[in-house]
Amino acid sequence: DATEIDGNEKIVNVPDPKEFFRGRYSSIPESFVFPTWGTRFTGWRNWLLGSIHVEGNKRWRIKPYRLICRGELHTKELMDEYRLKWKPIFTKMTKAPGIAIPPNYEDIDEAFVYSSFDIATEYLKERYSYIFRKPKNMTDRYRLGTWSKKVKPSQVRKYGTPADIKKLPPLKPVKRTGKRKSPS
């Protein structure tokens, strides 16, 4: 399956790419990077549906980001970006009551992307109201890393409203390992 671009160049669609990297096959091409542009909505779409990655004349269909395993990512930087910027905010959004993400991403249409985003946003407003006290044009410009930082329990305890803090799970006791130093 090839698509013509500008009448000259053909893009070859790679339906299910498998690249051998670090001793195993991966469906994520080595040149893949997470998009740094966009809004929480475009990130939500990628979380649910995946994206298209173009390299040279090949176009890869990247699976939904929620299905990516860190081991499939080719660099520590990508693994960290996924763990710190993508996963926290979208994991919280998927916990919104009323969102049941179909296991097969081909069953997800644009109507579901929009409606689930609205439901998830209302859930965020209920649990993290302090974020939405800023003007809408400001929160709309937040990048994913900012969103993920703001939903961290430590940030909510520091900046959240009393109602936001009440909704957090209780703190787990810290286990101390090793001997305590005695005062000298």
Image: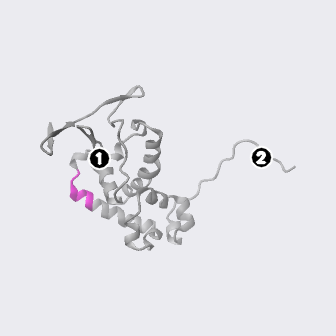
Mark 1 surroundings within 10 Å by alpha-carbon count, few (fewer than 14), some (14 through 19), many (20 or more): some
Q: Earlier in the sequence, mark 2 or mark 1?
A: 1
- Quadrant of the rendering where the N terminus is positioned: top left
Residue placed most toward the observer, 93 or 74: 74
Residue named by callout 2: 180
Q: Is residue 169 visible?
A: no
- Does the magenta stretch mainly form a helix, a strand or a loop? helix
Residue lying at the far right of the rendered structure: 184
Rendering colour mode: one colour
Relative to the observer, which residue lies in front, 160 or 28? 28
Q: Residue furthest left?
A: 7
- One can see residue 76 in this view: yes
Q: Residue at x 58, y 57 (%)?
A: 171
Asked whether 133 or 175 is in front, the reply is 133
Residue drawn at (38%, 72%), measured in percent from left and top? 136
**Residue 50, numbered circle:** 1
From the viewer's side, name the closer residue of 131 and 19: 19
Q: How many labels, in total? A: 2
Q: Residue at x 27, y 33 (%)?
A: 17
Left or right side of 130 for 99 = left
Please, what is the three-letter code of the amino acid marked with disc 1? Gly
Q: Which residues are magenta?
A: 108-114
The residue type indicated by label 2 comes to: Arg
Q: Would you say residue 75 sits in the magenta stretch?
A: no
